[in-house]
Amino acid sequence: MPDVTAAPLIIRNARLVDPASGREENGDLYAEGGVICDLGPSLRGSRPDGAREIDARGRVLAPGLVDMRAFVGEPGAEHRETIASASRAAAAGGVTTVVCMPDTNPPIDDPAVVDYLMRRARDTGIVRVMPAAALTKGLHGREMTEIGLLTEAGAAFVTDGLKTVANPQVMRRALTYARDIGALIVQHCEDPDLVGDGVVNEGENASRLGLLGIPREAETIVLERDLRLVRLTQGRYHAAMVSCADSVAIMARAKRDGLDATCGVSINSLTLNENDIGPYRTFLKLSPPLRHEDDRLSVVEALAEGIIDVVVSDHNPQDVETKRVPFAECADGAIGLETMLAAGLRLVHAGELSLVKLLRAMSSRPAEIMGLRQGRLARGAPADMILFDPDEPFVLDPADLRSISKNTPFDGARLQGRVHATIVAGRLVHGEV
């Protein structure tokens, strides 16, 4: 994101929603120097000449979304996505902070690569882009990286991205070392041996489609093991994505026991189930796979209760060559930066989740977990904000998406919730208002 000083900004007639405090009220907001200076039913004090004014027209003004899990092709796979294209997609979807995964070529397992990506983000991105660093060298799961140097260089946390650290001794050492320096370990919970050649959730639907299934135990065994190691080491741990009722029960127990453990859920697992795969729709081949409707309802309830902390886009762009092939042969992944908010609002409109709880899981809670100042509408907070109409309907046309790849699971879907303005550090980076 270029370092440009923003002009003073006044937003009037907004529905102010701050998920960090639960505050909801109609009012105005004033920002200057990239931070929020004042907000409320009536602004106090004088305002400088030349301040830009935006009439919100009663739309929701909320903190910009913070996405803890997005795959960006740069470096090494720029044909799938670049920092520039991903940040444009993020801005269009109301995401003002993006954490990109270390599954690149080369992997982000060296402080020099972290520095390179941060410079690329400053030069070509229009939102805040932060790299996550690799937990093990080369993402091979055998030798721990220099976690301290990587976090000092600016990595948001350490993770092996789509790969699971299967060796418990490596995970134990990583949790112990990370504990002593205050770093966060993020794990993709999926045992590769139990996954095997599976491509969908194990069960009746897999049998009907004639596809090999992935048991829920591929997720729960890794999660259970890791949380026992967290108990042993007292380290900080975050399960990147949980997707089933059994995982929810495991996380609930860990939180009751006071472990320093949090977890996320993909927007896909929240709003779709295995039946949406239909006639072998490859854009819905995901990791973890879409589960049974009972599992979806369980993760929605867990999000409402606070057992699940954050919602992620799990943005994973794939090109035509890796998706327009038979289901069992295609790559995992779907894009999600631009559709995460609108898809999540399905739950709000269905009465399954309040708007404040959805926004908390997409903004203030991930910011808290990573120790960021974003995710709040409060005096002194960064002026990273979105203005959106939660009720405005539209039909998603993949051709309109800003991502280079178009592998969206919501192709042709009827959605509600259009972002009209995205503001980063007080600057309008998306929208015309």
Image (tube, grey):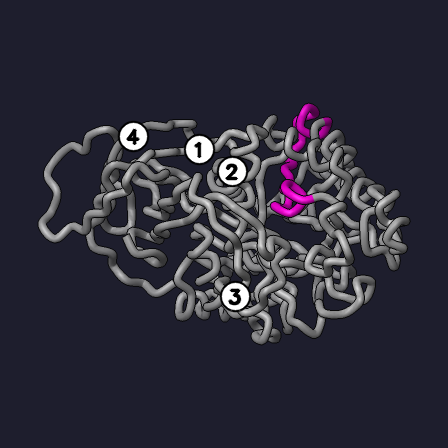
Residue type at mark 3: give it.
Ala
Q: Which residue is mark 2?
A: 365
Return the disc, 4 or 2, that comes first in the chain's sequence: 4
Return the disc, 3 or 4, that comes first in the chain's sequence: 4
Circle number at residue 26: 4
The residues colored magenta run: 253-272
Residue 256 included in the magenta stretch of the image: yes
Mark 3 vs mark 1, foreground winner is: 3
Q: Which structural element holds mark 3?
A: helix
Return the disc, 3 or 1, that comes first in the chain's sequence: 1
Foreground of the two, 136 or 219? 219
Residue at 63% from the left image edge and 37% from the top image edge? 262
Q: CA distance from mark 3 to mark 2?
A: 32 Å
Above or below residue 306? Residue 49 is: below
Residue at 59% from the left image edge and 71% from the top image edge? 80
Q: Which residue is mark 3?
A: 399
Above or below residue 295? Residue 342 is: below
Q: CA distance from mark 2 to mark 1?
A: 9 Å
Foreground of the two, 53 or 207? 207
